[in-house]
Amino acid sequence: MATPQNSTGENGFCFAQTLNFSHPSPPPGEAGRTFDAPSRREPCGTPLSNGTASSGAPSPSDSCAEPLCSTNPGEEETQFGKGIKYVSAEGEELACGWGGFTPRCLQLFNTSKGILFFLCVASFLQGMTVNGFINTVITSIERRFDLRSYQSGLIASSYDIAACICLTFVSYFGGNGHKPQWLGWGVLVMGLGSLLFALPHFTTGRYEAHSAAEVGICGGNQSLPCAQAASSLSGYRFIFMLGQFLHGMGATPLYTLGVTYLDENVKTNYSPVYIAVFYTAAILGPAAGYLVGGMFLNIYTEIGREIDITPENTLWVGAWWIGFLGAGAASLLISIPILGYPQRLPGSQRYIVMRVSEAHQLKDGSHKKASDPDFGKTVKDLPRSVLLLLKNPTFIFLCLAGATEATLIAGMSTFGPKFLESQFSLSASDAATFFGYLVVPAGGGGTFLGGFLVNKFKLRCSGIIKLCLLCTVSSLLAIFIFFIHCPNMPMAGVTQTYEGSALPGGHINLTAACNTECDCLQETYSPVCGSNNIMYYSPCHAGCKKVSENLRNGKKVYHECTCVEKTVLPGPSDAEAGKCTSSCAKRPLLLFFMFVVILFTFLSSIPALTATLRCVSDRQRSFALGIQWIVVRTLGGIPGPIAFGSMIDKSCLLWQDQCGEQGSCYVYQNSAMSQYTLIAGLVYKVLGTTFFIVACLLYKPPPPELAPGSSDASENGNCDLQEHKPSLPAEEDI
């Protein structure tokens, strides 16, 4: 069919009505930006791409077969100026399929809703793997491969390091290339990264967990040679880092090219809703990862092997690797349909023509360079593209605000389950499940609600930034909840002496008169909860001499514990395997305000992304998202987990001791952990609030005369070009 097409090779667009450019002598880069639609119809008999001719009679089936105006080649240059010409758009270019294989049944999915579905599945898998499974199993990986928190923080940050390396290349060339091809191959690489991440489970020996029943009770066989206890498995962290690196490479196109592909294939006022749905799937992914990952952690890592310890035991390592195998296989499968989508969806060009620019206006007018159809096609334009973005203060401060939010999100998503595990004395699987229950409604609901509010109130760019500011201030107020914390469960020799008196901070003394004859090893950490509601390092350190099994819950019960006996006379001197249950009265309050912080943090994410897309020129949107992600990851995503990991390490009370070498942390001081979290939250939330204020104050919108038909738009904030109702046909809701 004959359709108008940009001279730079843009795919065509079509209307049943003719359009007349009403402003005389438009400048060469701006031709076609402003137009009025007359009520007169000019039938044209132009050949279709399959060789047939279209009649002048209008019909729904050929409504897109008529050009915008006269197709006389001689009239194009005189009527429109340079930059617009009419060519035939080949039907194959807009068909869904792989190469020459484009079956008719696949064209049912060749719509904006179809690509939204597959991109949602891809973002769900990415979120479930990178922000769900990895954060859920981080404690188990630390335990299995003898890693410290800062090393696991490096594993988490490898994702962002890869993204920073790839973002400039992918967003610049992918933004002007075939976006679905970039997206499909990216999802495939992401799947390979998941499979690689699970590889260490299959290349290491069996995990041996020494039960307290064997080596832990007083008078038992306490010989545990250092050669047996020591491990060199920490070198596997480089395999995990490589897997995360592939995750970062694969996900790079997803949140840059995927967002712009959706944005340019739907109406402007529907774009925030589509992007919100896309990002909601990305938020629900981690939530599912926490829940499913928590279930897998209740399965012993060596499936099918008999084991005499329970998930509550700190030596337990769950089946952390199962989720990565499933997510990797699913990513490989979902990449196939994404690779089949065309460079542009059928009929999408109409939305590009109707779009009104809200780009920040630079004083020197250099922002107009980006309107040149040939701009950004070669590497030579890369420095100029970067310079234009750097001269845009609104864009810069939106990037900085995003970086502050990303630091908190990355840090809390990585160590949030560990925070709950310590504060509420939970097992790793229970903490991951708890955190999942917080993220599902708060993160997913906040993300979708943010896009809905932008669409509902038809907010323009300045109004969107103000909404982000309101959300950031709300979460800033809620973060003061970290002033409170749950007290540590009393632990003999760590938080208090065996006699019950306070123990000076940092002075660990696990030996007392009640267990000196037991000759206990510090390498055997298997906490038990005495009937006096005090935790002990192991049954041996509690002075327990006999062991049995509780038929009600399957946990081991230790008897004749001399250290427990001293404090509960004349009651039973028993101890049960696992941590003591916390009865912290502040738990509901702490969980509620954590929910509020997560809700308002994610509520601003889609509005901030929409404001970024609006404040730059159309041709720079993909590249602008790429640069923004570089800033966000460099200043936020990469240092976030490392900084939080280092802070959490500082609040450690009891370190693993492997023959004199420090391993992972066993017990954290809850008050210090809350204080460090509060300080970090306040610093970054105050910075984020400041950046949003500056972005709002410095934003300079285009003058009203550049937005034809915008009299209505200026009233309701709608950024769409207002069509003349008698002239253009009613469009179907997307």
Image (spheres, rainbow, N blue to C red):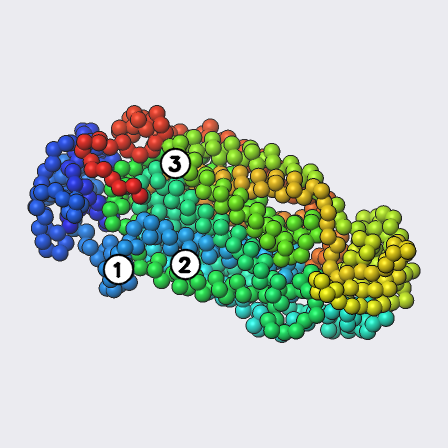
* Amino acid type, mark 1: Cys
Instruction: Determine the secondary structure under disc 1.
Output: helix
Work out whether residue 365 or residue 732 is closer to the camera in this orientation and state it: 732
What whole-number distance in Å separates the C-alpha atoms at marks 3 and 2?
A: 30 Å
Q: Which residue is most to the front?
A: 552
Eye-nearest disc, 1 or 2: 1
Please state, as top left, top right, bottom left or bottom right, where the C terminus lies in the image: top left
Against 467, is 201 above or below? Answer: below
Task: Say whether residue 411 is visible.
Answer: no
Mark number displayed over residue 455 = 3
* Amino acid type, mark 2: Gly
Residue under label 2: 186
Mark number displayed over residue 420 = none
Residue 661, position in %: x, y? Answer: 74, 63
Residue under label 1: 105
Which residue shows up at 60% across the image and 36% down it?
478
Residue 611, position in %: x, y? Answer: 42, 37
